Amino acid sequence: MSLLSIRDLHAGYGSADVLHGISMDVDAGQVVVVLGANGAGKTTTMRAIAGLIGRRGTVELDGKPLGKRPEQVVGAGISLVPQGRGTLGQLTVMDNLRVGAALRDDKDGVASDIERWTEVFPVLGRRSHQIAGSLSGGEQQMLAVARALMSRPRLLLCDEPSLGLAPIVVQELFDTLSQINKADGTALLIVEQNAELAMDLADTVYLLDVGTIAATGTPAEFRSDDAVRSAYLGY
Ligand code: ATP
């Protein structure tokens, strides 16, 4: 059984649908990457799963319907790293991490997770009392990932984690995501423009095209498909 199963998902803004019935699966511990051109509906997919916008269709976690409110989604074990600077800019780094654990009541576990993530992302430890809004873009992205991990998700949704980051920081961030996936078995659903880098991590790739799934396969299958390669991988 899939960890996350999406069937015939429709979502959009106002009366206009952006997603026209997409179906996707994420197995436990898997890394799934969603590729697609600008405006294809990648962010909309993430926001619909996370409960930030309304949705129709079936979304199940472990075979059980996933609630539609953001706190139900987090409580069920799914956490979103939003696109852009997904931190609470007025709060300190430490308070952002605490907010990420707001639904937990295991104080000791929360404290040890804060210690863990500030070791994994040392800059967050060094700047723990700094206001998040004054961190650099890359530092804020690390904080957004660490904050999302503070709920101990079984599935982490990452919306364009590489956006606006220097190549070396991007590589570091993807290495860290890969380590978290391997060490904890946290499944990853990643939306990414940097297709090559994301595919290095992926077990399964979906191609989203104007709100529908146009192709599905392994990274090897995607790389050997001439049409997909020239349109989305640029070589
Ligand atoms: P990108 O790679 O450029 O981030 P994307 O695949 O993530 O693109 P979405 O952000 O999901 O695309 O947007 C899909 C469509 O929905 C676009 O046509 C966009 O203009 C529209 N859209 C996004 N957000 C809103 C909104 N808040 N209100 C109305 N339309 C929106």
Image (cartoon, helix red, strand yellow):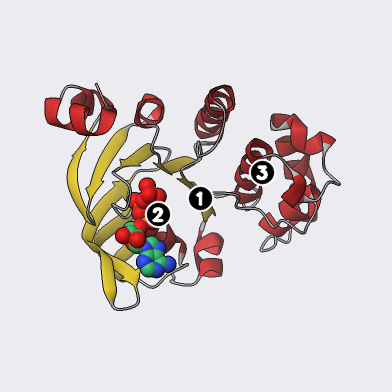
Which residue, given by chain and number where applicable, does mark 3 sit on? 140
Q: How many marks?
A: 3
Look at the picture and state if 128 lies above or below 54.
above
Question: Regarding mark 1 in the picture, which secondary structure is present there?
Answer: loop
Q: Which mark is residue 43?
A: 2
Residue drawn at x 51%, y 40% as measured from the top left: 161
Residue 199 point in image, percent of width and height: 35, 28
Q: Can residue 154 be seen in the rendering of this structure?
A: yes
The crowding category of the residue bearing disc 2, from other C-alpha atoms within 10 Å (few below 14, some 14 to 19, many at least 20), is some
Does residue 94 appear to the left or right of 9 in the view shown? Answer: right
Does residue 17 appear to the left or right of 99 in the view shown? Answer: left
For marks 2 and 3, the one nearer the N-term is 2
Asked if disc 1 is less than 8 Å from ligand 1, the answer is yes
For marks 3 and 1, the one nearer the N-term is 1
Look at the picture and state if 187 lies above or below 212.
above
Indicate the amino acid at tag 1. Answer: Gln
Quadrant of the rendered image containing residue 128: top right
Distance, label 3 to label 1, CA atoms, is 11 Å
Quadrant of the rendered image containing residue 7: bottom left
Question: Regarding mark 3 in the picture, which secondary structure is present there?
Answer: helix
The crowding category of the residue bearing disc 1, from other C-alpha atoms within 10 Å (few below 14, some 14 to 19, many at least 20), is some
Q: Nearer the viewer, residue 46 or 235?
A: 235
For marks 2 and 1, the one nearer the N-term is 2
Ligand 1, image quadrant it occupies = bottom left
Distance, label 2 to label 1, CA atoms, is 8 Å
Distance, label 2 to label 3, CA atoms, is 19 Å
Which residue, given by chain and number where applicable, does mark 1 sit on? 83
Residue 67 point in image, percent of width and height: 44, 70
